[in-house]
Amino acid sequence: MCLRRLIYNKKLPAAFICYKRADDFEFPNLIREHLNNKGYHAFLNHQDIIPAVNYDVYLEDSIKNSANFILVITKSTFLDINEPKDYVCKEIRLAFKYKTKIMPVINLEKSGRLPEEASLPHDIQELIHLQYIEYQHNRPDEALRDIRKNLRKTRLIISRILFTLFLFVFTCMALTILVPESSLKNLQTKIDQIHFRNDSIVIQVPASNPLTEPGTSGDINPTGDIEGLIPTLPSDHKTQINQLLNKTGLDRSLRESMNYRTTYLSSRLQNEVFEKALSGLKKVSDLLNDKGLLTDSAAFYFKMASGQYEKRQSEYALENYYKTIKHAIPDFK
């Protein structure tokens, strides 16, 4: 990802996200947030359009320079597809024109489906023959992962590649000329301390090292087996989160907060119940975020909730903290 950021011109998006704004706003934002977090620049018109530019020209340039075209399909995507001013149709035409990789993503939560071939304009009928990805609200990470895995690699900027190669060659030459020979000998000495024993790597530590126990040989692992030196992490995300909640005693608090939220939703006059629900869900969400245990979709809702909490938009914050936890621990009871 670091190399991609180094040689990638952010003005040229890796993916252009096409959607019907009136019907689906949240899912396109989730796609953009996910791809940006993974090092790709995804273009979303209401987020990335530059003020005081010709909208049509800027839109065409963005699609032309995109490696991928992500079409989010809902029940209203193709309602106006034959209207001359329909922007969804215009954007799809541009994607075909510039041979951008088109990736249909059907939002099942918004009753999305592909139309009949005959109902589409002739020049975009090929759309229905493309393999699509399905998005379900209760399993967002699967769709996001499939989108990311199927992206065509970003078009690289030749000038930046050449500049990177030049910088690398120049750095190597500078090190060869400027680094003292004595430093190189010290480096070689340290390299020589690494040798192979029984096909395992063993690092020799000088006896004067304060971390070495008196009377030991100086090997970090005398048996040559380095597996014992690497801490193992739980492979199951849910197990790791449950262990954390049990250890901190927040599992019971989380269940109470979930119940408080349900009680508040059934009768919106209980301010004390609302505060308890919001406080408990926020506390658990903050903990999971601090420990790096949020999935991509959970992190998206957590970011929204935190901003709403700071702006004192408490009811919105409550719902998004709730979604944060449900996406981080889908089957929490």
Image: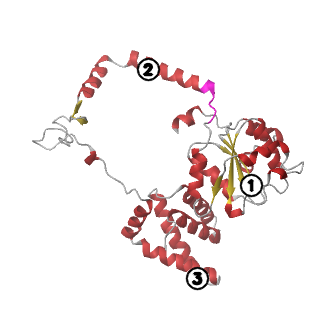
Q: Which mark is residue 114?
A: 1
Calculate the distance from the C-alpha at mark 2 to the C-alpha at mark 3: 66 Å
Residue at 82 percent across and 45 percent down: it is: 90
Q: Is residue 200 visible?
A: yes
Calculate the distance from the C-alpha at mark 1 to the C-alpha at mark 2: 55 Å
Q: Nearer the viewer, residue 232 or 177?
A: 232
Type of the residue with mark 2:
Cys
- The residue positioned farthest toward the left in the image shown: 215
Percent across and percent down for residue 138 are 59, 64
Percent across and percent down for residue 112 are 72, 59
Q: Is residue 191 above or below residue 270?
A: above
Q: Secondary structure at mark 3?
A: helix
Residue depth check, mark 3 versus mark 1: number of the one nearer the observer: 1
Q: Residue at label 3?
A: 263
Q: Residue at label 2?
A: 172
N-terminal of the two: label 3 or label 1? Answer: 1
Q: Secondary structure at mark 2?
A: helix
N-terminal of the two: label 2 or label 3? Answer: 2
Local crowd size for mark 2, using a 10 Å CA cut-off: few (<14), some (14–19), many (≥20): few
Residue depth check, mark 1 versus mark 2: number of the one nearer the observer: 1
Calculate the distance from the C-alpha at mark 3 to the C-alpha at mark 1: 40 Å
Q: Which residues are magenta?
A: 154-160
